[in-house]
Amino acid sequence: MRTDTDANADTDIDTTLSRRSFIQAASIAPLALPWIVPGRALGKEKGAPAASERVAIGWVGCGGRGNYDASRLARHGAQIVALCDVNKKHLDSTAKRYKVAASACGGDFRQTVGRKDIDAVLVATNDHWHVLVALAALKAGKDIYVEKPLGVTVAEGRFLADAVKKTDRIFMHGTEQRSMASVRRVCELVRNGRIGKVTKVTTACPGGVRSGPPKITAVPDTLDFDMYTGPSPKCKFDARRIHTRYHFHISDYCPTGFLTGWGIHHHDIFHWAMGLDDTGPVAIEGVADYAPKTDLCDCPVTWTINYEYAGGVKMTFVDGKKFPRANGIKFEGDKGWIQLHYGGATSASDPKILGSKITDSDVRLYDAGKGDDNFNFVQCVKSRKETCSPIEAAHRSTAVGYLGEIACRLKRKLKFDPKTELFVGDDEAGKLLSRPMRAPWKLA
């Protein structure tokens, strides 16, 4: 089982455009494409095989995490036919590996997603690009596999969720665990009362990283750093900004670090097990230890955050130092407990809980089949059925981390309305539900 710090290596949108061509491309509105359904996705384009026979993928963000997804998509019958990356080293090595023609490789994702020879887009960029690339792909009529988390703010996630719902496009969120049989079984055990009434839930993931202050260096000739930066604030180059150990902990790209970037894995499963996919917490309170503001990595390092949901459900989210085996989720009920460790391993207060049979009369959850969300995505592109990780669930599980960080930053208990997705009586907190984008990029 991969870890985010290994497999998500340098998952950035990189470009080989010249400065002049980038400026010309940037003058085009990011979403200035019509809402269309490509004929080849329906097998109607002359000479093109039906989607049931072949799923053609345009891949944006050819770093480590993208390679993880692409290799599995290819294994399950997808064909990588177009590439986009702002790092020429990534682009060249990936093109060679997948035998993609140079004419189908480039640095502007808008050109990639607009190609007529692709059915779907794999969005495996840094977090700050996820929503903009996904929106452009939707506008071009493509199905989308979007790596987690959904965006960098609650507002971004809601914008994409609403956009997906206006189309008939297939969406998959790359949180992985919903496709695992062992994870689904734990959720079914919890949902069907095998540990009784759930009284407490604890989620945990690895904490943040300390980096020290920036170390400014020249931008490599192989990197278009301006495009890499995209909608984030303009800054000077530090090689760690494109290094997997660090860039997930830099607020320019990932505003809450692992608090959302990794925590989403477990919050997603918490929601699934408890039937909370279409809602969110009503109260949040927490404390966090942040890296110094003078550091390159400036996200939370350790934290303890308490969430309350309607009906009395409570969840506590901690960094891994405060949790057995450092990474997972524990459900405690009035008849026992069950713990799910990241990657699918399970334990329980009584072996009989794990051995309990789920019957046809019990609540049954989505069975993704082969235990691989990449497989599920390919099958759903063909069948046009919803994936195991749908858009509303993706948005709600992503929002958990961002809401928690806002409470930590403001150092007070916040009340939240999950229907309106606004804080109750707190304008200061409300302003943190979104953040500005650097021109010319915008949600539209």
Image: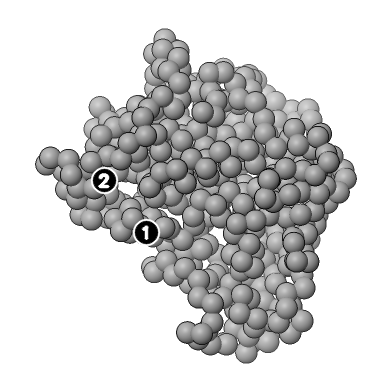
Q: Identify the residue position indicated by label 2 in the image.
A: 41
Q: As displayed, is residue 286 above or below residue 141?
A: below
Q: Identify the residue position indicated by label 1 in the image.
A: 385
Residue beneath the point at 52% across and 43% down: 162
Q: As displayed, is residue 226 above or below residue 125?
A: above
Q: As displayed, is residue 316 above or below residue 8?
A: below
Question: Horizontally, is 389 left or right of 114 in the view?
Answer: right
Which kind of residue does numbered mark 2 sit on?
Ala
Which of the pair 122/213 is nearer the observer? 122
Q: Can residue 299 be seen from the camera position used here? A: yes
Residue beneath the point at 41% across and 58% down: 386
Residue beneath the point at 57% across and 87% down: 355
Which kind of residue does numbered mark 1 sit on?
Lys
Density class for disc 2 (Cα within 10 Å; few <14, some 14-19, many ≥20) is many
How far across and down, in percent of the image, does residue 87 sit?
44, 28
How far across and down, in percent of the image, does residue 402 sit?
69, 44
How far across and down, in percent of the image, does residue 430 sit?
76, 37
Residue projecting furthest to the right? 412
Which of the labelled discs sits on residue 282, or is there none?
none
Q: Earlier in the sequence, mark 1 or mark 2?
A: 2
Residue beneath the point at 67% across and 24% down: 215
Question: Horizontally, is 140 left or right of 230 in the view?
Answer: left
Mark 1 and mark 2: span between their CA atoms?
14 Å
Residue projecting furthest to the bottom? 352
Helix, strand or loop at label 1? It is loop
Helix, strand or loop at label 2? It is helix
Which of the pair 317/406 is nearer the observer? 406
Quarter of the rendering containing residue 247: top right
Q: Are marks 1 and 2 in contact (CB under 8 Å)?
A: no
Density class for disc 1 (Cα within 10 Å; few <14, some 14-19, many ≥20) is some
Quarter of the rendering containing residue 75: bottom left
